[in-house]
Image: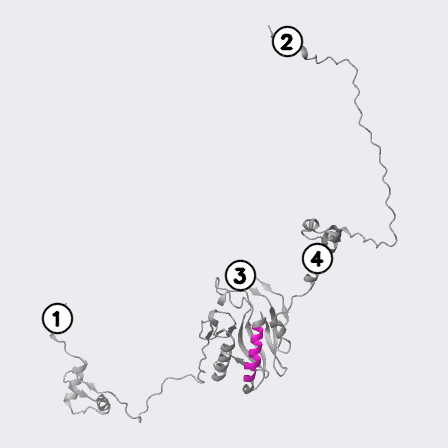
Amino acid sequence: MLAEPALAARRSVPFPFADLFSPPRPRPHRAVHRAVMVPLPKPRPAEAPAARPPEPPAAAEKARPADHGKAADKAPPADHGKAADKASDDKAAEQAAPPQPSACRQALTEEIAIAPSIPAIHGNGGCGGDDLVRLEAIVLPDKRKVAVKPAAILRCTMATAIADWVRSDIAPLSGPLGGTISELDNFDSFECRGRNRVPGAQLSEHGRANAIDVRAFKLANGRSISLTDRSVPRDLRETVLHSACTRFTTVLGPGSDGYHEDHIHLDRMERRNNYRICQWDVWDPLPAVAPLLPAERPEEAPPREVAAKEDPKSGAKTDTKSENTKSKNAKPDAGDSDATESKPAATNPQPTKKRRQSRRH
């Protein structure tokens, strides 16, 4: 039997199908708001400034900076267009303007050398460099040109050092040789490689466009002056050696390491305490005729001085020179029986007792 609270709860719940056949209840409609009439704006007065035409979408996107959202929050809307235009104009001007030439580039004029600038080279491992030129010719003080064949790709500072060296030191040396200098034989300049082309070696100064290998100088009369040729006068090669070691920090030639026997290596490598390397052996000229074997001594030549020889048996010193002359001049007498008998005894010695015993063993 159910308790009274439970019965009260069951009686209070209505039957779910009580409204099944009752008519539908009307739903309330939303309130309809009347449209408010907005008045049209007044016409623009005649004395007002002209309105700015809208920018095309492509130009607006191009001129929009990377931090457009932040700038829009900070700057007022009226100045946003002017700031974007100014930033785009500055960026375009910076890209269009060429880089300012260095002090070396400004000093290396066409009165000193024909060396047009080339773009910077940046390779693997620090290969290449900035402020590069292509040294095609060196202009001497009398306006004559010394061609660099082939043209050398160098840093501006290295090209300037080569030009000053040729103009001041090398050109005056060509006068006594019977002609004026007209060409520099460039064996190697810029090449991205290790030292002496050894795989895995440290980057060479050639790889930094800071070195050149000079093999010879050619004169206007067609003569070639090789710096490692022994037939070239020794004093001339020594003069070139001293001038090169004064102007460059590294000079390598014959006798340095076996890789520079036929050319001279020059570079301007910077080291601690301005340390320099100058290794170039100036060899003596080779003889014109190869030396032959010594000639046979003539008979009328005086006898050579020979030291006295000590006799081990008697201890007396005998003059070897007199013995040699006696042995040459002395002739055995036919009637001398001792002389004839001593010969076979000397040539065929009789075996002694010790020799016989040794033969038994």
Q: Is residue 259 visible?
A: no
* Of residues 140 and 70, the one drawn nearer to the viewer in this rendering: 70
Q: Is residue 31 above or below residue 149?
A: above
Image spot of residue 28 (x, y percent): 79, 23
Where is 32 relative to 137, above or below? above
Judging by the rendered image, the residue that carries numbered circle 2 is 7
The answer to which of 105 and 166 lies nearer the viewer is 105
Question: In this orientation, which residue lies closer to the viewer: 258 or 99?
Answer: 99
Relative to 14, 314 lies left or right: left
- Kindly identify the residue that appears in the image at 14 percent across and 89 percent down: 337
**Going 48% across and 84% down the picture, which residue do you hit?**
235
The residue segment tinted magenta is 158-173
Figure quadrant of the C terminus: bottom left
Q: Amino acid at mark 2?
A: Leu
Residue denoted by label 1: 357
Pinpoint residue 193: horizontal percent, then vertical percent: 52, 65
Disc on the earlier residue, 3 or 4: 4
Quadrant in the rendering for residue 128: bottom right
